Image: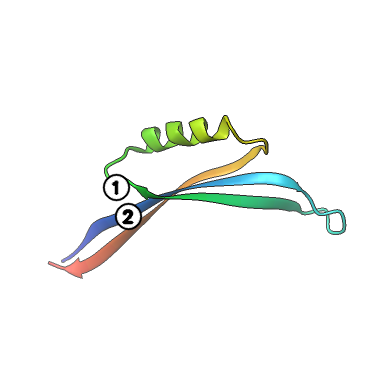
Amino acid sequence: MVTADLRSSQLRLVLAIGTDPVSGRSIQKTKSFSNIKTSSTDEAIFNIAQAFLSVQTSPLANISRNDVSHLHLS
């Protein structure tokens, strides 16, 4: 049987900073925050993201949580 141990979590905010004048595609900037407690709930991380967004000048494109787990046989 394989089990997973959650090792780390990261909060990523993707901000829309403009549009490429040649291609018309959206230009995005990512801000990453590491060392998020793995026991944090999704709602708590979302609330933290909202607090960070209150001091940003660019509009939000996406909020994501990235978790890293180690898999092993038990």
The amino acid at mark 1 is: Thr
Q: Quadrant of residue 1?
A: bottom left
User: In the rendered view, would you say 71 is above or below 42?
Assistant: below
Callouts 2 and 1 close, C-beta under 8 Å: yes
- Tell me if 49 is positioned left or right of 37 in this view: right
Q: Residues within 10 Å of mark 1 (few under 14, many from 20)?
A: few
Q: Position of residue 4 (x, y in %)?
A: 23, 60
Left/right placement of residue 23 relative to residue 58 reads: right
The residue under the point 58% across, 32% down is 55
Write the residue at 57% across / 44% down. 62
Q: Position of residue 11 (x, y in %)?
A: 45, 47
**Sequence order check, earlier mark of 2 and 1:** 2
Res 20 quadrant in image: bottom right
Residue 6 in the image, given as x and y percentages of width and height:
27, 55
Image coloring type: rainbow
**Residue shown at the point (22%, 58%) measured from the top left:** 5
Q: What is the secondary structure assignment of the residue under circle 2?
A: strand
Circle 2 packing at 10 Å, graded few (<14), some (14-19), many (20+), is some
Residue nearest the observer in this picture, 54 or 21:
54
How many tags in the picture?
2
In three-dimensional space, the C-alpha distance between marks 2 and 1, rounded to whole angstroms, equals 6 Å
Q: Kindly identify which residue carries mark 1.
A: 38
Q: Write the residue at 48% across / 46% down.
A: 64
Which amino acid lies under the numbered mark 2 shown in the image of this protein? Ser
- Compared with 25, 37 (above or below) is above
Establish if 35 lies above or below 70: above
As drawn, the residue found furthest toward the right would be 22
Give the residue furthest to the front.
55
Q: Position of residue 8 (x, y in %)?
A: 32, 55
In the drawing, what numbered circle is on residue 8? 2
